[in-house]
């Protein structure tokens, strides 16, 4: 069997950022990844692509003025490895789209009308949706015979109860401008909650869970019987937990104060809160490894950043335990959640009275598979479950095409 034919039935998953393009060729049924990579600094003179295929990693620098050029470059690297994407019998191209607004809450086959609507609601996610769209347009131009499917970050949280989804502002203003809590990282929260149930050997409908997606972007969710009842991110991915460069929750009056007193423009405040705040704003670092190293040397700013991060995380843990009433599992995922031993330990420290006991030795184990880190006598299971948004997107995209 040729390398090209071995890609038959696979889904090419694309995640286009403003200056980047992550991709993965996934077989939804077997979970096999034939190739993956990332193009970075698209539009700059020093743009590059890192491509891994057949166990071999290639790093190349080449001018990529736009995402169309990046997709062409990517396809060339696939071909060099023996996979002609245009003739490989792909099932679909699955696109991560951050915001579905009130319109999209299921994986959706992409048409010209769908593109127009994603563009219309881009005002809800101006940092993300326009970039997602350029990836969609590039794929549709270069792989016109392969169905494209959009999978929305907000979809899983579409059915949040009104009490959790509603902001307490004038209803006319809110309705006119589509202001509500949408939630994000939904693909990850859904996948991880399902995998947690599989790991525990329990029916998803019988489990109440708290999922902690802790990466550079971070969010938590409360999930009752497979259905989310609350999440930390809101109308935008800025609300909620302290993140790598995002502030998370702040008094909205701070925005007014910065405008009126510091004379910062809306765009300057946007940049401050999204790119210059969070851990980076507190200590100059948004990489937990660097923060841990700084704390080890007695750096006070790193310690404060860490403590603020843990404080916010524990506040939401407590809130979601009350909301759920009964908690069966707490699951950590994403880069920090899967790898930062101290974050898991400190987030749950002193909660034995609530039935939460971490086993220190289990917590120290580093692995790429789902695992339990709670003690045997813990009444709440504490898990680490690696997220796999690409696999989830591939499966949802394949299902849309199969059902169309």
Image (spheres, grey):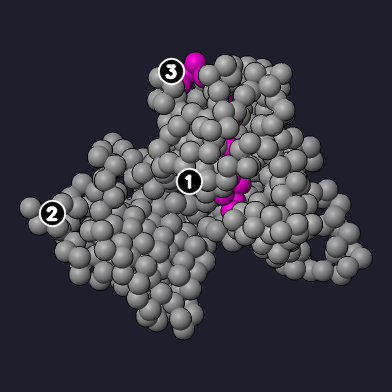
User: Can you see residue 256?
Assistant: yes
Quarter holding the C terminus? top left
Q: Which residues are magenta?
A: 202-220
Residue 308 on image: x %, y %: 76, 47
Q: Residue 27, image x and y in percent? A: 26, 45
Indicate the quadrant where residue 287 lies. Answer: bottom right
Q: Is disc 1 in contact with disc 3, using a CB cutoff of under 8 Å?
A: no
Q: What residue would you read off at disc 3?
A: 202
Q: Nearer the viewer, mark 3 or mark 2?
A: 3
Query: Mark 2, residues whose alpha carbon is within 10 Å: few (<14), some, or many (≥20)?
Result: some
- Residue placed under numbered mark 1 in the picture: 152
From the viewer's side, name the closer residue of 171 and 318: 318
The residues tagged by marks 2 and 1 sit, at their Cα atoms, a distance apart of 29 Å
Label ID, residue 54 = none
Name the image quarter holding residue 66. bottom left
Coordinates of residue 118 in the picture (x, y in percent): 50, 54
Question: At 60% across and 28% down in the image, what residue appears?
Answer: 358
In the picture shown, does residue 73 fall above or below 205? below
Left or right: residue 96 versus residue 256 is: left
Query: Would you place residue 272 above or below residue 171 in this image?
Result: below
What residue is drawn where x is 69% and y is 55%?
296
Upstream in sequence: badge 2 or badge 1: 2
Query: What is the secondary structure assignment of the residue under circle 1?
Result: strand
């Amino acid at each position: 069997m040729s390398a090209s034919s071995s890609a038959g039935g696979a889904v090419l998953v694309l995640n286009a950022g403003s200056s980047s393009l992550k991709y993965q060729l996934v077989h939804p049924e077997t979970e096999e990844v034939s190739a993956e990579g990332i193009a970075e600094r698209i539009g700059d003179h020093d743009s590059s692509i890192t491509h891994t295929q057949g166990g071999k990693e290639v790093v190349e620098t080449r001018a990529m003025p736009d995402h169309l050029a990046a997709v062409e470059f990517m396809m060339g690297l696939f071909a060099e490895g023996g996979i002609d994407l245009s003739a490989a019998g792909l099932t679909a191209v699955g696109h991560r789209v951050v915001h579905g607004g009130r319109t999209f809450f299921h994986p959706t086959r992409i048409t010209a009308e769908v593109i127009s609507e994603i563009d219309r609601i881009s005002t809800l996610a101006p940092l993300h949706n326009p970039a997602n769209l350029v990836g969609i347009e590039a794929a549709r131009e270069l792989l016109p015979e392969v169905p494209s499917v959009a999978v929305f970050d907000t979809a899983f949280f579409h059915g949040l109860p009104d009490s959790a989804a509603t902001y307490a502002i004038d209803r006319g203003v809110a309705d006119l401008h589509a202001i509500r809590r949408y939630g994000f990282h939904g693909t990850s929260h859904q996948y991880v909650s399902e995998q947690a149930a599989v790991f525990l050997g329990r029916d998803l409908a019988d489990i109440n869970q708290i999922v902690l997606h802790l990466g550079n972007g971070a969010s938590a969710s409360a999930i009752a019987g497979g259905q989310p009842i609350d999440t930390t991110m809101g109308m935008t991915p800025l609300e909620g937990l302290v993140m790598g460069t995002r502030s998370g929750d702040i008094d909205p009056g701070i925005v007014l104060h910065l405008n009126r007193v510091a004379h910062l423009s809306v765009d300057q405040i946007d940049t401050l809160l999204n790119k210059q705040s969070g851990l980076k704003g507190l200590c100059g670092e948004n990489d937990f490894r660097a923060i841990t190293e700084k704390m080890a040397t007695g750096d006070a700013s790193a310690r404060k950043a860490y403590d603020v991060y843990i404080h916010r995380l524990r506040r939401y843990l407590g809130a979601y335990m009350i909301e759920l009433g009964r908690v069966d599992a707490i699951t950590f995922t994403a880069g920090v959640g899967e790898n930062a031993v101290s974050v898991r330990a400190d987030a749950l420290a002193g909660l034995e009275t609530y039935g939460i006991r971490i086993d220190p030795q289990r917590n120290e184990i580093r692995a790429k598979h789902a695992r339990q880190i709670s003690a045997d006598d813990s009444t709440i299971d504490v898990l680490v479950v690696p997220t796999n948004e690409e696999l989830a997107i591939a499966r949802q995209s394949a299902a849309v095409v199969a059902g169309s």
